[in-house]
Image (cartoon, rainbow, N blue to C red):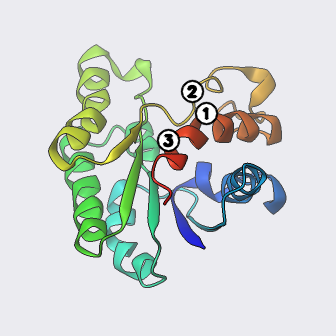
Amino acid sequence: MTHILAFGDSLTAGYGLENMFSFPVVLERQLRERGHAVRVTNAGVSGDTSAGGAARISWALADKPDILILELGANDALQGLSPEHTKRNLADIIRACQAQGVRVLLAGMHAPRNLGPEYAAAFDAVYPALVQEFGVAFHPFFLEGVALDASLNQQDGMHPNAAGVEVVVRNIVPAVERLLP
């Protein structure tokens, strides 16, 4: 059985949702329905930044995952943190995973456009640069098809509702399947 660790922030943790509608639970269900023997563990921490993820990666890797879905950076952008710091923290996480032979799927994020075009361009470039540097698998935008769609988000407009999580998972499944044995 392949162990997948969903490592991220509130989008991974399932903020505002019953556990059965959280990203890791829905991902495991959809992958099993497609015939894959997987176990998906939720290592999402609401409010986490890339720095928080870098600080807890060794603890998370102690669970010996085969694959780690890295979904961090949204809170960095919401706080206007330096894209260079985000990149460095995500690189540290990827290095830690690769040192233990864990395959990484990097789930990209986009900066809010209200921070200006320079910040958005610098932040949005972080994820493709990491893919280029480390050769990890890439899902360009975790919230593809869900962001800014009120019918797929909770009232805060930032966190997917149960229907939104289904879309997020459906979109990321092909990238996950490419990493499965």
Give the CA separation, mark 1 to mark 3.
Answer: 8 Å
Residue depicted at 73% across the width and 59% down the height: 25
For the N terminus, the image quarter is bottom right
Label 3 secondary element: helix
- The correct choice, above or below, for 151 with respect to 143 in the image is above
State which quadrant residue 14 falls in.
bottom right
Residue depicted at 74% across the width and 32% down the height: 153
| Res. 58 visible in picture | yes
- The correct choice, above or below, for 4 with respect to 106 in the image is below
x%, y% of residue 165?
A: 72, 41
Of circles 3 and 2, which is in front?
Answer: 3
Mark 1 vs 2, N-terminal side: 2
Residue tagged by mark 1?
Answer: 171
- Tell me: 114 left or right of 19: left
Q: Amino acid at mark 2?
A: Glu
The label shown at residue 175 is 3
Residue tagged by mark 2?
Answer: 144
Label 2 secondary element: loop
- The correct choice, above or below, for 20 with respect to 164 in the image is below
Residue depicted at 68% across the width and 30% down the height: 157
| Circle 1/circle 2 CB separation < 8 Å | yes
